[in-house]
Image (cartoon, grey):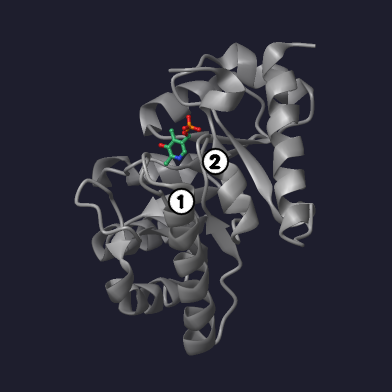
């Protein structure tokens, strides 16, 4: 078996185990294979083994890969999205995880209408408050979520966050829990379901799986170090 497939299966098994520990249904947690910086060959190996969801963080790279790979791949855009790349992202990505400003939100809504698409979007939240992190602070999330809910051409599905890389596991767990509770409150306030929480990377996906994540974004542990 190719190493990437073995790696993928190992991560999947660890997600399932973490979910069960937390009395969650493992089927609630999707594994997004983050293929950024890696060539198309390992993506195709995973595709041939049945994997369909891949994450990319640069639009140009996503476009190059999408042109060379099967059309039924479900591309997730997870990186910082520059406004001049928004149209390409709407054309190619089924899910955009990294919507971090009202300006970007409104641009995506307009472009999605023009392109006759309805991408799923997640709002990126800076839960930890680190200055280096993208995303909207928790305190500013409600008006942002209301704007997202009003975008007719976007399917507003929930939230994404990145935990600090070097924090203690209990601190990381607290960050994921805070986003989950904030999501629960916003569901009640907005009167709509916001089912997706994109939380967890190679270093913390098991913590995320125990604390409410529905999409873990794993690159290094599947494809290798970048
Ligand atoms: C690169 C990246 C990942 C995957 O990171 P790994 O540590 O390699 O698993 C997840 N989320 C985002 C937003 C990324 O940019």
Residue nearest the observer in this picture, 79 or 5: 5
Q: Residue at x 46, y 51 (%)?
A: 97
CA distance for labels 1 and 2: 10 Å
Q: Residue at x 53, y 34 (%)?
A: 202
Callout in the foreground (1, 2): 2
Label 2 CB less than 8 angstroms from ligand 1: yes
Q: Which mark is residue 40?
A: none
Q: Secondary structure at mark 2?
A: strand
Residue under pointer 2: 217
Residue nearest the observer in this picture, 98 or 85: 98
Q: Label 1: few (<14), some or many (≥20) within 10 Å? A: many
Q: Which mark is residue 97?
A: 1
Label 1 CB less than 8 angstroms from ligand 1: yes
Which mark is first along the chain, 2 or 1? 1
Q: Residue at x 32, y 44 (%)?
A: 81
Q: Position of residue 114 (x, y in %)?
A: 41, 56
Q: Position of residue 44 (x, y in %)?
A: 67, 18
Taking the image as four quarters, which one is ligand 1 found in? top left
In this rendering, the answer to whether 145 lies above or below 67 is below
Residue nearest the observer in this picture, 106 or 179: 179
Q: Position of residue 123 (x, y in %)?
A: 41, 61
From the viewer's perspective, is 146 left or right of 198? left
Q: Position of residue 102 (x, y in %)?
A: 27, 65
From the viewer's perspective, is 44 left or right of 180? right
In this rendering, the answer to whether 226 lies above or below 70 is above
Counting the numbered discs, the total is 2
Contact? badges 1 and 2 (CB < 8 Å): yes
Q: Quadrant of the C terminus?
A: top left
Q: Quadrant of the N terminus?
A: top right
């Amino acid at each position: 078996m190719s190493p990437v497939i073995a790696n993928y299966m190992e991560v999947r098994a660890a997600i399932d185990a973490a979910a069960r520990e937390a009395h969650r249904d493992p089927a609630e947690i999707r594994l997004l294979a983050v293929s950024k910086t890696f060539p198309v060959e390992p993506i195709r190996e995973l595709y041939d083994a049945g994997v369909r969801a891949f994450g990319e963080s640069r639009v140009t790279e996503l476009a190059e890969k999408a042109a060379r790979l099967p059309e039924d791949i479900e591309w997730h855009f997870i990186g910082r999205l520059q406004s001049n790349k928004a149209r390409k992202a709407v054309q190619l990505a089924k899910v955009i995880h990294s919507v971090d400003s009202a300006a970007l939100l409104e641009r995506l809504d307009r472009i999605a209408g023009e392109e006759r698409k309805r991408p799923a979007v997640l709002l990126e939240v800076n839960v930890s408050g680190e200055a280096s992190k993208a995303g909207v602070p928790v305190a500013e999330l409600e008006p942002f979520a209301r704007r997202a809910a009003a975008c007719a051409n976007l399917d507003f599905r929930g939230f994404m966050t990145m935990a600090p890389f070097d924090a203690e596991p209990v601190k990381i767990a607290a960050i994921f829990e805070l986003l989950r509770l904030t999501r629960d409150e916003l569901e009640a306030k907005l009167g709509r379901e916001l089912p997706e929480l994109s939380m967890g990377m190679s270093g913390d996906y098991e913590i995320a799986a125990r604390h409410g994540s529905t999409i873990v974004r794993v690159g290094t542990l599947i494809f290798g170090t970048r």
